[in-house]
Image: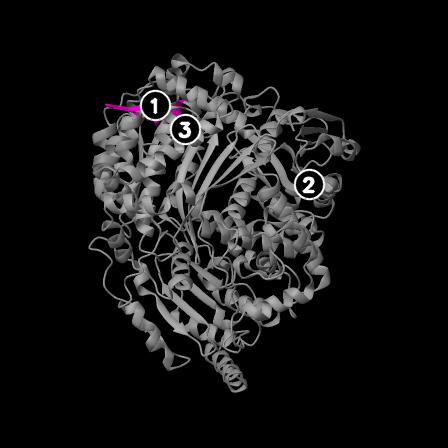
Amino acid sequence: MPVAAHHSTSLFGRARVLLCWGALGVLLLGAAAASAQFEDPALRTRVTRLENGLTVLTLVDRSTPVVSFQMWVKVGSRDEAHYTGLAHLFEHMMFRGTDRLPPESHERLIQARGGRVNAFTTRDVTVYYEDLPADALPLAIELEAERLANLQVTEATLASEREVVLEERRMRIDDQPQGRAFEALLTLAFPAHPYRVPVIGWRSDVAAVDVATCRDFFRTYYAPNNIVISLAGAFDEEDALAQIRAAFGGLEPAPSIPRNPTAELPQNGERRQVVYFDLRSPIFTAAWHAPATGHPDAEPLDVASLVLSGGRSSRLYRKLVYESQLALSATGSYWELLDAGLFYAYANVRPDGEIAEVERQLLAELARLRDEPITPGELAKAKRQIEVDLVGASDTAHALASRIGRDWVSFERIRSLEERLAAFRAVTAADVQRVARTYLRDENRNVVYVVPPPPEADR
Amino acid sequence: MRLHVARARAAAAVMGALLGCAGAGLPAWERPLPPIDESPVVPADRLHRSRLENGLDVLVLEDLRSPRLHIGLVARLGAGSEDPAVAGAAGFTTDLMERGAGERDALALAQAVEELGASLSAAAGWDSTRVSISGLSEDRDALFAILADVVRRPRFEPGEIDRLRAERLAAFEQQKDDPSSLVTKHLERALYPDHRYGIASEGEPATVAALDAESVRTAYRRIFQPGNSILYVVGDIRGDAARAHAAAHFSDWPSGSVSSPGPAPPARTPPRTRVVVVDRPDLSQSQLALAHEGLARTDPTRLEAALANSVLGGGGFLSRLMTRLRADEGLTYGVGSGFSMRRHPGPFRVRTSTRVEETGRVVGMILEEMARLKTEPPTEQELSNAKTYSAGSFALSLETSAAIANSLVDLDVYGLSPDLLDTYRGRIRAMPAEAVAHAARERFHPDRLVVLVVGPADALVSQLEPFGPVQVVQP
């Protein structure tokens, strides 16, 4: 979801100044209710920064018996240098034991409390989480700190984990038409920026990465000043902060965090790629360069997404699935990343459908967004859909911790529900038409077809 | 920095002293686990049950913390009750219910729902069929009215029937592109060749191609009867207001006769081990399943069987299969096992994936672990872990009011006692080791199962022949 970048004078903005006064600096974030009908729990988030640079977000919500403890490490595949897939492979290695704990102890200890434990890597971040019964929070805190302080990376554990990751790659990408489509689309759309690389990495690199490279990556990026902890649910805030200080306070900060400097080049013409795959329902997908997260055009782009594919009354469903019956599904969505964004379209072509005709009709619908304003009814409907989504996005401790964690790593502040809703309420039909004209241009388009290979004789 | 580290260590020492609890000097992972929390999970003060005169049960769970409302009608019959000749009729019917009801045709209905920012869903499971809508509580009048239209006044327009049939047939073709979908479809076919469970709940091309307006109306009348349904209302609404809405929209829904839930399946399947390879020559990874008959949802020994399964493959990294196949050998991204509990015994299955050349080895290891569960029952530590895992994940799964209401409706569908949620963790804690060992011996059959593999037959057949006769089929 997008961002409002124009609230730099809010309480959240000032927080950063106040935080400088010391290891115990804390600040209670804004107290005003988000709206008359619903108090946004995220407003109660408290921000603490330890002297070593670790940021801790705590959000007490006693309406749930659960605590979600999340560790957001500001490293993703965009930060990789020689070996692609390293950020993700390393996420796996974080579960392979420490000086004091054998491999997989972390998951086993959390699961033995009934907790959920997992992690994910994106192009921008790596996130580790434990959702647990409230009384198990100290275990999660100590286990996360333990692997930051004493992680073991050995030849043996790396060798077996490398195979696990290659299995994951086969499952998600190599044998999946959608995975192939997405991988091809990103390499096409980003010839320069590291977003071109699949998060799971290229097979050759995953197979070759060694222990020394892993250790170096760990020292470089897994420093407290590159980590945000977010914590939501039923817990005692003072106790939790004291435990976190005790467990994490001794970690050494890194002097600097290297980032790839490469920026994507302006695109000066359409690019196309065909991927052959043994499939019955071909895939059409396309992507246009769009702004990075935090840009004020994000809200109109989200509205455009909903006009195109927010349910069965949306334009793409009506045109391609319902009326012409050429596709099994058809969507258009805005995808925001830290350094760049994409607007992408995706359609599953019916086995009896013609992919070129799907492309023609889908692009005609996108052209209509440029050529004429959306109707007042479409605008109102999209805003209502967003409002209901945002209100429902704080249902669980995990959802709350994710929301504040994501906001903090993206903007170093937490956007209130009211702020988000106000930004969407301000969107006009003219805004949507303007962003469509700005970004959904033909020369800014990358197109991928995934289709069955032609018969041998035609190759 | 050195100064800083010293200060942090001092802080840790102070913390330990302040906490002053038993074992505070030990790492958290070495401290003893607290006893299983057995407190009730259903908020009795917010739960209201009633019944309309036509027999429709009404369950309301108030939750005023957020301005959301979820409403659903669940009929206590699903695809499992169908005659196999019309397999898929229930799901086809519910899909059509979303495509026109009351005064609105398909697009007008979608428009009405989406203008509210709401979501509408109608779907048939094996044992129940659900129509649900969720949105903001300020739209409660409209949400109830739309739900009542969809449940009571579906249009079943001929044009929509033709359109949906064509869509479904295309979707069946598309499923062949997805290796996991192929596993499910072919596994059920191999396990239950003569039973409704042998066809996917959404049917198969031959049965769906034959569905028409008459079969849809027949399925609708059979499934949707107020005397065999429960209406749930969860969220930002008071119990009396919810009941008033329910009565206004459903009390004049006439009751009819209630159908039987269908015949029982064969108790044991398969009689002997067989191997089925679904040939996808292009794949680099095998998707595989090992399966035999499992348990009914109401089986009185389901809890001990679930604990035994947790030790085998249901307990994530605590399980023997995950430890061996992933952690020790790096052979897979994941492996799990479980019982698909339905009104009649659905399958027990182990699911995993591995590179093609390791497929035979992985099948052998799974069979060894299934056999070992019988000869080496869960250890004290394994059983303790399985119990705390089950009790803890149960509590986590009921974090929201919607989840609690869903679980209460599920108990209702199977005629199980509504207090089973509140007593679950106590029953887990008290389960004797011998009962779990007995389930471990009796419920798993490595000597007779279906081994189903999706992948390149050329490379697979010779690896799999040692396990039983191999049949190669097309997707």
Q: Please tell me which residue lies in front, A367 or B370.
A: A367
Height in image: B7 above or below A77? below
Disc 3 marks which amino acid? Arg
Instruction: Examine the structure image and report whether residue B391 is included in the region drawn in magenta.
Output: no
Height in image: B335 above or below A407? above
Q: Element type at marker 2?
A: helix
Residue B85 location (% of width, % of height): 51, 15
Quarter holding residue B223: top left
Mark 1 crowdedness (10 Å alpha carbons): few <14, some 14-19, many ≥20: many
Question: In the drawing, what numbered circle is on residue A430?
Answer: none
Q: CA distance from mark 3 to mark 1?
A: 9 Å
Tell me the chain of label 1: B
Residue matched to label 1: B225
Residue matched to label 2: B441
Q: Please tell me which residue lies in front, B255 or B115.
A: B115
Closer to the eye: label 3 or 2: 3
Mark found first going from the N terminus, 2 or 1: 1
Tell me the chain of label 3: B
Q: CA distance from mark 2 to mark 1?
A: 42 Å
Instruction: Examine the structure image and report whether residue B99 is included in the region drawn in magenta.
Output: yes
Disc 2 marks which amino acid? Arg
Residue matched to label 3: B76
